[in-house]
Image (tube, helix red, strand yellow):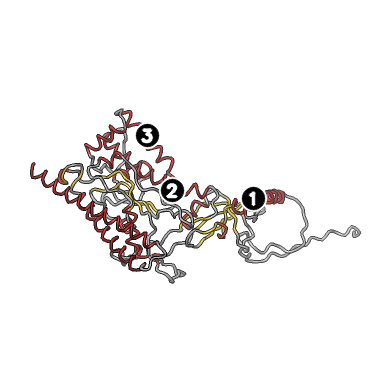
Amino acid sequence: MAAKRGSQDKMENHLEEFRKALKSAEEWQRSLEKLVDDPESSSKEQVEELEDTVGAAAQMLFDFQDYLSQWTVGGDVHSDSPTYQSIPELRTVPWKTLSNLRSPDKVHYAVEYSLYQPTETDLDPNEERASKSRTNRRSHKARAEVKEPQQNCETSVETEETDSPPSKTRQGPRELPERVRINSQRLAIFLDYNVHDRTLAWSSYERTPLCFLRPYKFLVSKNEQIRSELKDMERIRSDRRPGTEEEYNEELKRTLPEDEIPPHEVKLDAVPVVQLTALIKDLRCLVKFMDEFVQPSIERIWSRTDHVFFSDLWYLYPAGSLIYVKNKKVPQKIWKVIQRTSGRRYMTPPIDDHYDHSAPWFLKFTPFVIDCFHIDYDGSRYVRTYETLRIEHFEGFQPVTSLLVLPLQAAEEEGLVDRKVLIARGQDFVKCTRASHREYVGRNQILRPNGLKLNQKMKTCQIKQPDSRSG
């Protein structure tokens, strides 16, 4: 027992030394970053190179700290600790780490994301490791801002303070993180079996992480249900064993339940209370991500924003909303959105013959697609006329008015449409559908509502009035 304790003390001493070295490296990098940002710096290139070197060294320290931390969990040596343990924190990691779909470490954070957008080096499938360039520095910076993991689980359990949301830049707000990764096995099982329909793309058998990509359709569509489930968990826990949050956390700190539950629907009234507490805290991490990133993006766009990222388009055109098409070749200007899809980065090389090979495939995005319709009259009844609109990928934070498809409200503000005129025209259209005898002389319709030419021009039919003087 004494040897066991001595081994633990020795390992903790090594861990403390690495923490000190890591803190020094972080201070060096912050100082170097200030020099790089100084426009009057005469040795900017040399400073950048040195900064990258320090960043790479700090990254190695982080990795080794994670390795050491697996040996000291909850005050016991690794052999006596649970096989898998989830630390209930929302944590930032380099994008290269986030894109790894292998089983997470035995001691892992519940939810992870990357604060920065991936670079070409990150995305290149032929790269075995990230380049020692500015990419490494940015990835390290994102990770360094997260507080050190507390391997005795005391701080990790009792506090959930993590990174603040990305700050606004001169060009506007930061783009949504490209993905979020659920490492917590119990949380992934709960989301798949209790919230969804057991079809999420992950493997409980292989313990692969559960990843959601922006625009986070699952989190948006299940937003209310996820929050309701969290309240139900807290209520059930309180009914089963009344106590304060501090008491629940203290029990969790003492017990350290394994991050392992059967892969089927979670019966909240049958799960041990300590495991239920762990699940609650893991789910709070996901809700925190939703509150700090997803919800602000939705609110920004729905509050009539005038600029968007390409990844924001799914929020800009909600299903059931009206849109305006700026294409002069399309006579029908107002359409109703049925659904929207695509607009994501290529995950595999495309097989489309018309694909543009001017840039590597992993840097390309699929077009954003809007399926929509408008109501037309075929001579006997009202019918839906369907159309598919595409918006090609664009870089940066662009004005909404630069798009070929505008939300109706934006089109009104630009003076492109007048709602009263549209309503009056619609009422006239309805009147024309009623049976009546009319005479028409003039050009006939040659274009469909979607701008395509009719297969055959209809001949103008002139009806002559009978001569009253005859017979």
Q: CA distance from mark 2 to mark 1?
A: 43 Å
Mark seen at residue 148 = none
Marks 3 and 2 sit apart, C-alpha to C-alpha, by 23 Å
Q: Which-is-in-front pick, marks 3 and 2?
A: 2
**Residue found at the far bottom of this picture:** 358
Name the foreground residue: 161 vs 455: 161
> First in sequence: mark 3 or mark 1?
3
Q: Label 1 amino acid? A: Arg
Q: Is residue 240 above or below residue 114?
A: above
Front residue of 22 and 306: 22
* Residue extending furthest toward the left: 2
Residue 420 position in % (x across, y down):
68, 48
What element does badge 1 sit on? loop
Numbered tag placed on residue 381 in the rendering: 1
Which mark's residue is nearer the viewer, 3 or 1?
A: 3
* Residue pointed to by mark 3: 232
Task: Give coordinates of residue 464: x percent, y percent.
Answer: 82, 61
